[in-house]
Amino acid sequence: MKLLIALITLASLMATQLAYADIVQLKNGRTITGRVVVQDEKVIEIDIGGGSVSLNMEEVDHVEEPGENVILAPVDNVETLSSSGSAAKTADVIDVIKEKWANYFGKDKEDIEKGRQHFLKATNFMKIGDADNAIIQFNKAISCGYKEGVTYSLLGVAYEAKGANSKARKYYRIALKELKKQLEYFEANNEKYMVNKTKMFIETAKNDLIRINAK
């Protein structure tokens, strides 16, 4: 039971690194989904997954939280948006971000969205200790083409929580392979934010393998 709790906690922490819940509603009718990291009377700063975007509060109608978790991939030169202060341009970039994930996985955006939804359902099952249903949802995410390295890492966590160590070892190895591929992609595109985050996940995957191999 202690192992199950520890692994579920790990899964929740890893999912939190990728999931953002705030919905910023703009006065022009558009929305930005991300994680609000700074907000005062004049400025709001939003982490959209590839960097932070700063807007004047006069452009914002309201902020909704918690909203639906969304996983975003980085875009090139997101930092330039922070200085532009253009809410419309920022909202347009969100769609570009999702398209980049689709391009990376070689899938349609619709398939990636379906996979993302299964991933989010899986992490919710992990948080309540339901490894069986989490495994079902992680596999559905993968079948949709949502083969992000962390998906495999958390699938391994779910199997390890069930005591299926050979399967856990298999998916930890796949996770490490996929994360290294993603790191090369992010480095080639000079996406520093995701480079640092992916390096962190790679270290987690390495530690997962060390732990499971010691059993």
Image: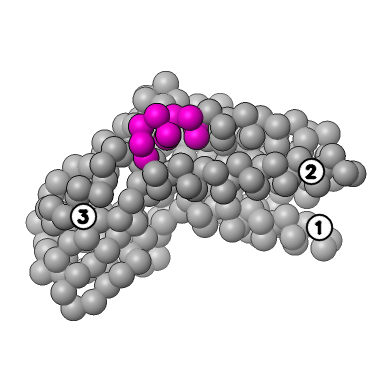
Describe residue 190's horizontal placement relative to residue 96 as left or right.
Answer: right
Q: Residues within 10 Å of mark 1 (few under 14, many from 20)?
A: few
Name the image quarter holding the C terminus: top right
What residue is shown at x 30% (from left), y 55% (from top)? 52
Residue 3 marker: 1
Amino acid under disc 3: Ser
Q: Residues within 10 Å of mark 3 (few under 14, many from 20)?
A: some
- Precedes in sequence: disc 2 or disc 3: 3
What residue is shown at x 42% (from left), y 34% (from top)? 187
Residue labelled with disc 3: 82
Amino acid under disc 2: Ile
- Precedes in sequence: disc 1 or disc 3: 1
Name the image quarter holding the N terminus: bottom right
Residue 210 marker: 2
The magenta stretch is 182-191
Q: Residue 2: x and y, percent?
A: 82, 63
Amino acid under disc 1: Leu
- Precedes in sequence: disc 1 or disc 2: 1
**Residue 186 found in image quarter:** top left
Asked which secondary structure carries label 3, the reply is helix
Q: Main secondary structure of the magenta part?
A: helix
Q: Is residue 129 above or below residue 118?
A: below
Q: Residue 197: x and y, percent?
A: 49, 48
Give the CA distance from mark 2 to mark 3.
Answer: 40 Å
